[in-house]
Amino acid sequence: MASDIKRRHEDWKSGTLTKALANMPERPERTVTASSRPVETLYLPDQLRDKAACQAYLERVGFPGEYPFTRGVQPTMYRSRFWTMRQYAGFATAEETNRRYRFLLEQGQTGLSVAFDLPTQIGYDSDHPLAAGEVGKVGVAIDPLADMEILFDAIPLDKVSTSMTINAPAAVLLAMYVAVGSKQGVAPEKLTGTIQNDVLKEYVARGTYIFPPGPSLRLVTNIFAYASEYLPRFNAISVSGYHIREAGSTAGQEIGFTLADGIEYVNAAVQAGLDVDQFAPRVAFFFGAMTDVLEEVAKFRAARRLWARIMKERFGAKSPRSCMLRFHTQTCGFTLTAQQVDNNVVRVALQALAGVLGGTQSLHTNSRDEALALPTEEAVQLALRTQQIIAHESGVAHTVDPLAGSYYVEKLTDAIEAEAETYIKKIDEMGGMVQAIEQHYPQSEIERSAYRYQQEIERGERIIVGVNRYASEETIQPETLTIGEEATRRQIERLNKTRAQRDSVAVSRALDALEAAARGDENLMPLILPAVQMYASVGEICDRLRAVFGEYEESAI
Amino acid sequence: MSKAGPKRILIGKVGLDGHDRGAKFIARALRNAGYEVIYTGIRRTPEQIVRTAVDEDVDALGLSLLSGAHNELFARVVELLQQENAENIVLFCGGTIPDKDIPHLQSLGFRRVFTPGTPLAEILGALEAELAGKR
């Protein structure tokens, strides 16, 4: 009967909710509709009469801030605090990117998100032959610590949280962040943010791997151990489905493969001797949002419920925090079109709305010109304004999980959860995600979905406005951002200057010690930190690790 | 020297960019259209791409890049092809390429530049026309 739900609602109000409000009261703004009707924090199926249906609701949907977290990880969700508005940004050198960060913070952005260039992501310095043409192109070039100091100049790291999209060399960039913090007088335990540190999906979809899976997983767990001891407020990983989705997966595959990656990391950490409830609360996730709003909302709800169950049943997690799937959302870049670029503003708004209705903890909105180039400042500002309009004007942030109870959304949530679970079971049978990747299983599943999707567009079964329907002759493209070779020259100049000025004996000693440790099995973070503080560069540190770990290479087909 | 059998196309991912959704789609679609297709996999150097193109004696080479490094890296591929006297290979490319860069790429010898949203039928038609009468 509904009395079960009413009773649990009273428990929730006096327990979970009261505790949450004591920590974080509701925002002072009025939570009323456009017609001034008051909006409650939470709406429940209080008309439900069937006992089995009540039971099913309590077990599978339940209350926000409580297991299985289907309705969200916070009891009040956005009534206390909006999601973090976090635009992924970085280009050219640290100077230009620092200016962009300060601009975004002035415009009301609430967190930073660092995009590194490809050489940095693959552990090459800007003067490496393989870096030619790529320096500063898709993100900011970082070589030694000197670059990171400029990147965060006049940005107080005790006030701003920072997400860093860095994977294979994550340990090096995290060490640099800690080093910049200490130069600013901010202790490691005060630093907040997220390091992506999800190397498995690099083999599946994104491609910025360096080492083979074995040593890569060691570095991941080294970061877990270091973070749980010294960086209690930092997310030690962001297990990422975004790139899997961008490579062409379905929503169910995105959740299945991402949570399977998550399982592999938790396994590796447990095997390395870490206690689940020590590190699991610092595991975060990252998903994409396509334009199919309701399927995306269902996907986010399904992911929360499934991960909660995995943590509790598979890993025996006792802390509710270990069972919470907290996630960042980025609108899917794949959906942006080079034709009629203004249409992208509308797509991004719908995708961002899906992220918010799905209960995201932070959000990046793409800019309208990103099918052409890196975004201009004007385009980024509009993307940020899109989030602000959803937050302040749409009203969807007034109440928790507003689409719960929709027949369609609940059905889709169940279906996506079931599809994801089938994939996880299949991967378990293969011996885990590393084995599945080696057998090209997730890769070929994604490729099949991507091919099918594109064929549907080619055949006109899927309409892309402005591309295969309502196309128009266009002659003028908007102004785009160009990263010139001049940035590369300045970057290499600074690198050479740092190399000339640093204590080269101390650098060699630190690098030798790191290489020796890499041959053993100790945690490498405490050896990487002094090396970066001596101004050893990302490339120099990664070269020492390459010498020990070897390199991974994708085969031709 | 004349070759028998279907025309051969190499799809190459040059540089450090890992975005391979487009390259894999084109490779598969060309295969389904009857071409013999080799896909290099991601993160190849210009040297590796040209080596494969010459060793495999391909009729056409399609480069894909989404990182914005196309001007530099594609030029290097063309330079190496010239050193190998392999200018007879039909060059085409695709990816995140702004309109303003297209004339430069064409002057390097790229017969076609396919930007995002180009219909597959248009790509197949263009390649058929470019490869007609070759060999």
Image (cartoon, coloured by chain):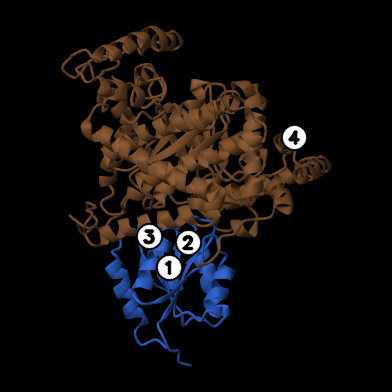
Sort mark 1 into few (<14), some (14-19) or many (20+) by Cα contacts within 10 Å. many
Q: Are marks 2 and 3 on the same chain?
A: yes
Point 37% across, 47% down: residue? A333
Find out whether the residues at labels 1 and 4 contact each other: C-beta distance under 8 Å: no
Disc number lying in front (2 or 4): 4
Chain displayed in blue: B
Q: Are marks 2 and 4 on the same chain?
A: no
Find out whether the residues at labels 2 and 1 contact each other: C-beta distance under 8 Å: yes
Q: Secondary structure at mark 2?
A: helix
Amino acid at dot 2: His
- Residue B105: mark: 1
Q: Chain of mark 3?
A: B
Residue at mark 3: B100
Q: Chain of mark 4?
A: A
Residue at mark 2: B70
**Mark-to-mark CA distance, 2 and 1:** 9 Å
In the image, B10 versus A390, the foreground residue is B10
Find out whether the residues at labels 2 and 3 contact each other: C-beta distance under 8 Å: no
In the image, A42 versus A380, the foreground residue is A42
Question: In this image, A420 relative to A414: left or right?
Answer: right
**Mark-to-mark CA distance, 2 and 4:** 37 Å
State the hue of chain A: brown
Look at the image and tell me whether residue A366 can be seen: no
Disc number lying in front (2 or 3): 2
Q: Chain of mark 1?
A: B
Q: Earlier in the sequence, mark 3 or mark 1?
A: 3
Q: Are marks 1 and 4 on the same chain?
A: no
